[in-house]
Amino acid sequence: MSAEAMSHSTAGQGHDDHGHHAPLKPFLLRMFTTTNHKDIGTMYLVFALLMLLCGGLAAMVIRAELMYPGMQLVQPDFFNQMTTVHGLLMVFGAIMPAFTGFANWMVPMMIGAPDMALPRLNNFSFWLLPFAFAILIGSVVMSVLGMGSAPNFGWTFYAPLSTTYGPASTDFFIFSVHLMGISSILGAINVVVTIFNLRAPGMTLMKMPLFVWTWLITAFLLIAVMPVLAGVVTMMLTDRHFGTSFFDAAGGGDPVMFQHIFWFFGHPEVYIMILPSFGIVSAIIPVFARKQLFGYPSMVYATASIALLSFVVWAHHMFTTGLPLAGSLFYMYMTMLISVPTGVKVFNWVATMWRGSMTFEVPMLFALAFVVLFTIGGFSGLMLAITPADYQYQDTYFVVAHFHYVLVTGSLFAIFAGAYYWLPKWSGHMFNTKLAQMHFWSSLLSVNLLFFPMHFVGLAGMPRRYADYSMQFADLNFWISIGGFWFGASQLFFLAVLFTIKRQPKASANPWEAQEGLEWTLPSPAPYHSFTQPPEIK
Amino acid sequence: MRSSVIVRLLLAVPLLFMSPLLLASSSWDMTPGVTDISSQVFHLHRTILYVCIAIGLGVFGMMFWSILHHRKSKGAVAAHFHESTMVEIIWTVIPFIILIGMAIPATRVLVAMNDTSDSSMTVRVTGSQWKWNYEYLTYDDDKSVGVSFFSVLSTPREQYERQGKGFGASNLPDFKAHPNYLLEVDKPLVIPSGQKIRFLITADDVIHAWWVPDFALKRDAVPGFVNEIWVDVPVGKEGIYRGRCAELCGKDHAFMPIVVEVKTKADFKQWLAGAKVQAEADAKAAAASVDYKYPSIDVAMKEGEAVYVARCAACHQVSGAGLPPMFPALKGSKIAVEKAHLQDHIDIILNGKNAMPGWKAILTPREMAAVTTYERNAWGNATGDLVQPSEFAK
């Protein structure tokens, strides 16, 4: 392959910059200029891992402060900065780029394409991210050095705390969010164009793997709502500096309107962070149950209906803002309705396992944990939908428990499942099974010690984003913190898996004996250009 | 072999929760509260919880049955089915019916919660960084009650500001002296039992949320807008109920609790009469304090320090160093040190500036004069200025 690539590179110099001559360039230049979907996918995944570690560090500060009552370590304002950057780094820096990394690697391979449809755009959309996050993390570094506060208004940056009362670094934050938004939109456009134009002959829409389907729908959600996020931060900017009063009642504006606009973005956003994980889990379970996915068409329709419903439930984040009765009822009913298609998915996964012939390799372990723990997050979501009860849950640790179950044991576990599932294809090596199993069991136990008691402290009345708490929450918070440190340390096993992978045995083309999936027809590691000839679709 | 280790580990998890701190018997569930509404909310919560647990047991039961019995190591051979229209219709329709069963009682409770008509008393609740203001507007036939006060955390600052004094069990707040640590205020809101009380919730600066779990009341306090909620505490449930701010409102979000004291109607009337007398006396004293003249800097400094610690130190810090750039230092600041800026200093104390609130509605001229004198002479700001209450006549 390399000889072929070399000859291509001499022939194609000048216009064909798709990375044939990759090995000839110095590493950094290659990273900057690459237009290859695998290089870019790898960069997205490595970047997401870095951000996961940074966001994790912020979480460790939070948990250390909350381990004992009394302000033990940091100032309350710095605590607020930590909750803010933890949320922003995890949502925009870890989960979303990780899924874009998966899309880059897997979508072309799964639909029988040579690469993404818009390779230069692909490069650009990745390289916006390091700059966006350098700005955001820069404001934290400045804060630590005593040069002013980092964003301290929560990842939801409600006005007027983030406008009239925001620190100077809010402008960094606004610029940073703009860059992240542009990156996401460009990445999403690329996914849509690739899926619609580069499918191999015979790969009809209803033959596409569910991962491709879920990402197609996710991409449409991104294109629909990232401009709304850009709009709301721009309105903040003009409120802060150009005399407008979009969110200031004194000038005829409305702080609650901020929340409506934010959550019109924010609710579809949470589905952006979960739909691709549905795709990953739907790829993994059939392979290790040795049985075809149950109800493929209903999986597609359920994903689409979840996406559509996600546009009409945003105000369930705002039940306590004083919505009119009719509004509260509408958003309660719509939110409850989402549990129907979500339930269909869970039932389909269980039906796929039913009377299968299961084995429990590490990708399957993470996928099974996903099904159970994501469903627990779904149950608490259903509880939160009940408006009168939500008045008691709103803004407590019950909400924190809920969204960490769907985002950590949901999205993040699916990302780990997918990483272990496709690592042999990406690297050409099997991973160290012992280390990976340690990673799984250690993460599974610690994550539940970390997040399950949060349900209890929330129900008992501890509000979220509290730097200090009253006596009755002390016992549980101690153990939550222990769970937090343990879960953080558990991720070192994952790093160990990655750093040792080159020393592991080589992987065959189809190491998991998958019955379906074009990616398994390619050798491991996958060639630089996935399918130079369109594969035959059965 | 391995599975037995895992089972043992799982059994150990509940034991882990028996903390070494053993501070208090903590509740692990939502409170049923003390009102009719709060108990309905509690029952909705328990119902939906049981529904979820039942569905969860069913789904996870099926899944774990599969995991145990349909495994390759037990010789299971995969079946070939991958769809069944009938099954798929059933598991779409049944959840839908369960949801309708849940939506009906939830709607009923929600409608009741929204009915703020026929209240006996109206109290305006205003959140500001980081205190609550309670203003009694009307009570029965009295259309202008005219009692209003601020309610501020009364746990001493040194109890919770423990940074740099060690970490952990050796550095805990004194819970014996402060069993209601972070849940105690200087002046609680007082309301009567057996009467419907309407609250008008609003805010001065950023969004706060007024939450008393025992009443199942939580509503955002939005600057420039007014939200309505109500409570009717049954006779016999008099007592003290504690709550918290539930919307991130800046650095001291965790330090602005809510305390509500529910009295019998007779006791409340007595309290209100006393509060009215006190309010009139306070207004008179405030007006008279303009004419007070501090005999010496020392007297003003002593009074000023008390006001400063209570009102100003949250932002500008006890040390006067502030938390720049959001909360500027007063120590060595131009405004607090230079003679030319004395009038600016007085204006800022009266009317506020940027994020700083004005104090003329809250402090008396004497208190404002004392705190100004204090700020101009503490922490090495040795101006020697003695500012008199007459400067704050407005």
Image (cartoon, grey):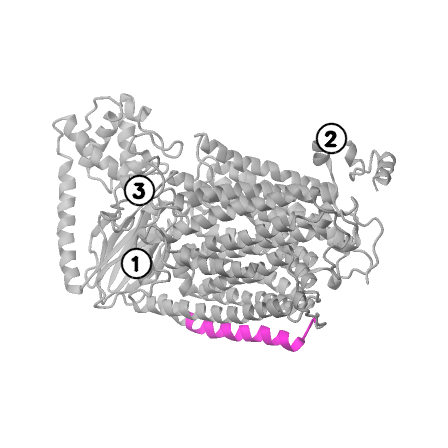
The residue that label 1 is drawn on is B199
> Which of these two is toward me, A351 or A207?
A351
Q: Which image quadrant: the C terminus of chain A?
A: bottom right
Q: Say if residue A308 shows up in the picture.
A: yes
Name the residue type under label 3.
Tyr
Residue A512 image-quadrant placement: bottom right
Mark 2 chain: A
- Which labelled disc corresponds to residue B160? 3
Q: Position of residue A277 (x, y in %)?
A: 62, 56
Query: Are the residues flagged by discs 3 and 1 from a single subunit?
Result: yes
Residue at horizontal 58 percent and vertical 50 percent from the top: A439
**In 3D space, how far apart are the residues under numbered discs 3 and 2 (Cα atoms)?**
55 Å
> Which of these two is toward me, B139 or A150?
A150
Mark 3 chain: B
Q: Secondary structure at mark 1?
A: strand
Residue at horizontal 54 percent and vertical 63 percent from the top: A375
Is B340 part of what is drawn in magenta?
Answer: no
Q: Position of residue B115 (x, y in %)?
A: 34, 67
- Which mark's residue is nearer the viewer, 3 or 1? 3
- Which mark's residue is nearer the viewer, 2 or 1? 2
Labels 3 and 1: the sequence-earlier one: 3
**In 3D space, how far apart are the residues under numbered discs 3 and 1 (Cα atoms)?**
31 Å
Q: Say if residue B111 shows up in the picture.
A: no
Q: Which segment did they paint magenta?
A: B82-106
Q: Secondary structure at mark 2?
A: loop
Binning the other alpha carbons within 10 Å of mark 2 as few (below 14), some (14 to 19) or many (20 upward) gives few
Query: Are the residues flagged by discs 3 and 2 from a single subunit?
Result: no
Prevalent SS, magenta region: helix
Name the residue type under label 2.
Pro
Q: Is residue B1 left or right of residue A286?
A: left
The residue that label 2 is drawn on is A26
